Image (cartoon, rainbow, N blue to C red):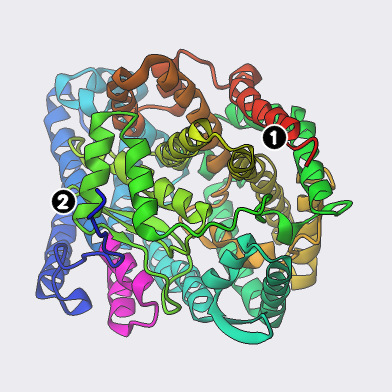
Amino acid sequence: MEDTKYQEVWDLDKLFPGGSESHQLLEHIKELKIKINKLHRKVSNFQPPHNVADSIKVAELMEYIGTLRIHLSQANSFIICLLAQNPKERKATSLQSEIGHIGASFESLVHKTQKILQSIEGKFWKELLDSNLLSNYKFILNEWRKQGEYQLNENEEKLVSDLMIDGYHSWGQFYNALISELKVHVSINGTINELSVGQAIKLRSHSDVEVRKESHEALEKTWEEKEDLFSRILNHIAGFRLQVYKNKGIENVLKEPLIDNRIEEDTLDAMWGAVNKHKKTFTDYLDKKAEMLGETKLNAYNFWAPITENKQQIDYKKAVDFVIKHLSEFGPELENFTLNAFEKGWVESENRSNKSAVAFCAGFPLIEESRIFMTYGGSINDVLTLTHELGHAYHNYAMKDVDGLNRHYPMSLAETASTFSEMIVLDAAIEKTTSNEEKIFLLDEKLKRSVMNFMNIYSRFLFEQNFYQERKQGFVTPSRLNTLMKEAINEAYNGSLGNASAYSWVWTPHYYITKSPFYNFPYTFGYLFSLCIYAKAKEKGKEFEREYLALLRDSGRMSTENLVMKYLEEDITSELFWEKGLRLCIKDVKEFIRLTENT
């Protein structure tokens, strides 16, 4: 491994050679249009089954929809990668619009199918699902039938679908393009540096407090200059969504994200109840960190500050070797998978200014590969981001033999494998170090993640709840958005964070995701759920990898409550389940405070 040099620019040519000008890509999109037309005929001719023998027609339709979803995902992921590496590429932007139209047609036909299934009489429905041909689709069919209750009629669904492409999803795309193009001017050692948003945000973990503060203030100034534009984008996204919900008879804005995450509201309430019950411990951590930095209250721009004098910059090769070494200790499949990801050029990590600020993992199910995108800057946080996205890719790997419909797992479980991988690498580093200073440094990094999940994510959840409530009454002004954000942060952090960014609603990209609102609580869910899985893995050793892969493989074909009951034999509607994970984090806080008592 010593002689290995890892490339920092990914290989996209294996997917579609030639980028946005790829002949194979254009042919793929052409084939997608043909397949969509074929699906349109299939759905138009599809009639509600009248006897169990008709189950073969349902199975054939489900299989075709699943196959088409995989082909659509392949093209969509590629376009996302092209725009991430170069947000200004016009051809890719045009192709994204084209794929968006195809995707909207696909979703419209799925909704029409759901509506047909919803019309089937209840008693016969059970008989139909008991047939052998539909056993593999039983969960998804029940889910679709339930979703069919909230579908509009065919003409209304088509109208909404058409409006979504250029009037709804395009707002989210516009947000991503705008963020990617913004430049932030930060003074470092007396020199003004023009940085991308991603590069400026990365300075929050800089060793020099003045650099952290300068970056924070420069970012706030940038957001203030663009607040009107960003508030319009956010209001338009929310306004459209609320109008669609109103037409569908949905009053609770949480209904869709709960369905998407396949969890009950009791589960969400239990999770937040447990988090809030034990929040005092994490304010103790923040107060201790403030004391160590000579502050009465921890300033937000110092939250990611390295707590010791450890100014180590980890070069990319060392980072990759570090990740491979520690992930290999979990199991042979994860080790081989990780080696393959780096050897085959799946990772884009180069630190340059003309790329997207957002790290992600994109799956390519047709060739059973993934691509990972990030900007590597040399910090431990970058190492963990890399590990996090590798976890997403491993989840994709676990689903490689699953059919197209059953590999679609919810957001809450999407964060499970990523967070689990982070824990393996970070805990291994903590356990192996013999230096108290380094242990404090690593514990601090770990506890930052606990605070992010228990406090920051909760502030996002509170903000989004309150924002949607006010948006129902009309346009929410930038100043009011700032107030809502400040109030949410103050409540979530128990008043223990100073100079928090009132513009968090601008630079948090999850608020602008048009697929579904509340892309926040799944992170906390995944974090705590991963802790429970991690505890079991440490107990069982490498033999647990098979169970873990089976859990990931099943993540697309059962409710979250049933999945946890099957593999962990736990009831997640009870606060007791969530407190098990919280206790592990509380233990970390106590150890951190013990080690820093005389610091």
Q: Name the residue at 69% across, 26% down.
A: 274
Query: Does residue 210 lie above or below 439 as drawn?
Result: below
Residue 156: image quadrant is bottom left
Nearer the N terminus, badge 1 or badge 2? 2
- Look at the image and tell me whether residue 33 can be seen: yes
Tell me the chief SS of the magenta region. helix
Q: Is residue 266 left or right of residue 298?
A: left
Q: Secondary structure at mark 2?
A: loop
Give the x, y percent position of residue 344: 18, 55
- Residue at the disc numbered 2: 366
In the displayed structure, 200 sits above or below 370; it is below
Which residue is at a point 46% across and 76% down the rendered structure image? 177
In the rendered structure, does residue 529 fall within the stretch colored magenta? no
* Part of the protein shown in magenta: 76-99
Q: Which residue is mark 1?
A: 592
Q: Nearer the viewer, mark 1 or mark 2?
A: 1
**Quick one: quadrant of the C terminus?**
top right
Q: Position of residue 310 (x, y in %)?
A: 60, 53
Amino acid type at mark 2: Leu
